[in-house]
C-alpha cells in the first residue's frame, strides 16, 4: 500500500467511528428526552397526590369536629361546593321571589 491509500483507509475508519459515536449520542439524547417526559408527568402525579390527598383525608375529620362544616353556609357538595339540589333550591327560591 502506498501512503495515499493508507491515509484514505484511515480517514474511512475515522468516519465510521464518528458515525457510530453520533448514533450512540443520538440514542442517549432520545433516552434523556424520554426520561425527562416521564419524570415531568411523574412529578405532576406526585404533586397532585400531595395536594389532593390531604383534602380528601381531612374532610371527614373536620366534619366530625365541626358538625356545621358539611351543611353550613357553604354548599353540601364535594369540598363545600353547592350540590345540584342546592343549586335547584336556590333557583326555585329566586324564581319564586320574582313572580
Image (cartoon, rainbow, N blue to C red):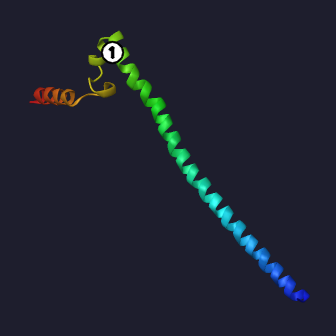
Q: Which residue is nearer to you in this view: 78 or 4? A: 4
Residue at (36% x, 10% y) in the render: 65
Looking at the image, residue 24 lies above or below residue 86: below
Looking at the image, residue 37 lies above or below residue 10: above
Q: Label 1: which residue?
A: 63
Characterize the local packing of mark 1: few (<14), some (14-19) or many (20 or more) Cα atoms within 10 angstroms: few
> Which quadrant is home to the N terminus?
bottom right
Return the x and y of residue 35 as percentages of the image width and height: 57, 50
Q: Quadrant of residue 28?
A: bottom right
Q: Quadrant of residue 62?
A: top left
Return the x and y of residue 5 as percentages of the image width and height: 85, 87
Residue at (50% x, 45% y) in the render: 41
Q: Residue furthest right?
A: 3
Q: Which residue is nearer to you in this view: 77 or 89? A: 77
Return the x and y of residue 94 as percentages of the image width and height: 16, 28
9 displayed left or right of 42: right
86 displayed left or right of 56: left
Q: Regarding mark 1 in the picture, which secondary structure is present there?
A: helix
> Which quadrant is home to the C terminus?
top left
Amino acid at each position: 500500500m502506498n501512503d495515499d491509500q493508507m491515509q484514505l483507509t484511515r480517514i474511512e475508519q475515522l468516519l465510521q467511528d464518528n458515525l457510530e459515536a453520533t448514533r450512540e449520542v443520538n440514542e442517549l439524547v432520545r433516552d434523556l428526552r424520554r426520561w425527562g417526559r416521564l419524570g415531568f408527568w411523574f412529578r405532576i402525579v406526585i404533586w397532585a397526590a400531595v395536594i389532593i390527598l390531604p383534602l380528601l383525608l381531612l374532610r371527614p375529620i373536620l366534619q366530625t369536629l365541626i358538625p356545621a362544616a358539611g351543611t353550613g353556609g357553604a354548599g353540601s357538595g364535594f369540598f363545600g361546593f353547592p350540590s345540584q339540589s342546592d343549586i335547584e333550591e336556590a333557583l326555585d327560591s329566586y324564581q319564586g321571589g320574582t313572580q
